[in-house]
Amino acid sequence: MELRQLTYALAVADTGSFTAAARRCHISQSALSTQIAQLEGELGVRLFHRTTRQVSLTEAGELFMATAGRMVELADELRAKMSAYTAESLSTLRVGSTQTATRVLDVPAALGRLRGRYPQVRITMTAGPSAELIDAVADGSLDIALAGSVSPLPDPRLTFRPLAAAEPLVAVVPVISPAPATSSTAPHGPIPLSQLAAAGPFIEFHPGSRLRTMVDTLFRDAGLHREIIFELGQIADVTRCAANGLGIAVVPRTFTVGLESTGTAIRDIEGDPALTIGAYTRRSAHEPVLHAMLELFGQRGLSATSG
């Protein structure tokens, strides 16, 4: 008994015709009839009543088809699973992540869990500015970029899926003299951008990142100029320099954990600017491993934004 014979028999039962079943199975009617006859000979029963006008199931045929249908479904399911396994075992997942995304999403932990689930997958990771990583997804050299949101999307081939709550931007500043409690510049209240700009100079992350673009835009839209004395490649270094009194830094809050205990002033910024971290993928991407990675962040209910 061969699987193709079961498929042919099911097609005859479904269409009620050897001719129609042969067309569905893309073989000649004579070849299909031969296979059905061989199957009946092996089973020792007739599966069909044959007349010049119609084909119908015998009692044995009714019994046979119920089980044959399940066998064909199981075979299809097995093929699909093996196909997915083969694809995964041969695939490489190419991940790009900004410094903020790596910290906020704990990307190494997520990739570790992914490796445990798909040990056959080769995972590569690239760090860089968001603009470079997003472009790499668009041109196909990366599968996913974890970075801050950009609106509108820079390429219509991309989608963006938020993966975490918006990350607040805060100011690491020298201690400012107390102001009246009714003032918006109270030591523990949000600091206005105008006061922040006047208190410079600034230590900034290098250009090309979503963080730098966002901070530049905040001050430009407010009509404020700020003096920049350092441009560094690591946000942790930016924060550390500010904490040591070399200037002011505007950074994601996650990079300031533990600094307040050292006496460094961490101030919220008026207007509550925040960076939304998420995943950029190509709209055509359907790789199971890629979707599994997104699921690891627990964001299956968040809808993607398309360009």
Image (cartoon, rainbow, N blue to C red):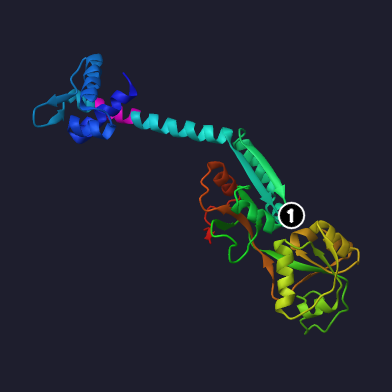
Image quadrant for the N terminus? top left
Q: Which residue is drawn at 69% across and 45% down?
A: 125
- Is disc 1 placed on a helix, strand or loop? helix
Q: Can residue 82 be seen in this view?
A: yes
| Amino acid type shown at disc 1 | Gln
Q: Which of 18 and 105 is in front in this view?
A: 18
Q: Where is residue 154 in the image (x, y as percent from the top left)?
A: 60, 62
Is 106 on the left-hand or right-hand side of 27? right
**Residue lying at 19% horizontally and 31% vertically, measured from the top left:** 19
* Residue span colored magenta: 64-71
**Residue 251 higher or lower than 285, as above or below:** below
> Is 60 on the left or on the right of 95, as rendered?
left
Quarter location, residue 183: bottom right
Q: Which of 18 and 269 is in front in this view?
A: 18
Residue 144: within the magenta? no
Q: Residues within 10 Å of mark 1 (few under 14, many from 20)?
A: many
- Which residue is pictured at 62% across the width and 33% down the height? 119
Residue annotated with mark 1 = 99
Q: In the rendering, at what x and y percent does residue 201 appear?
A: 87, 72
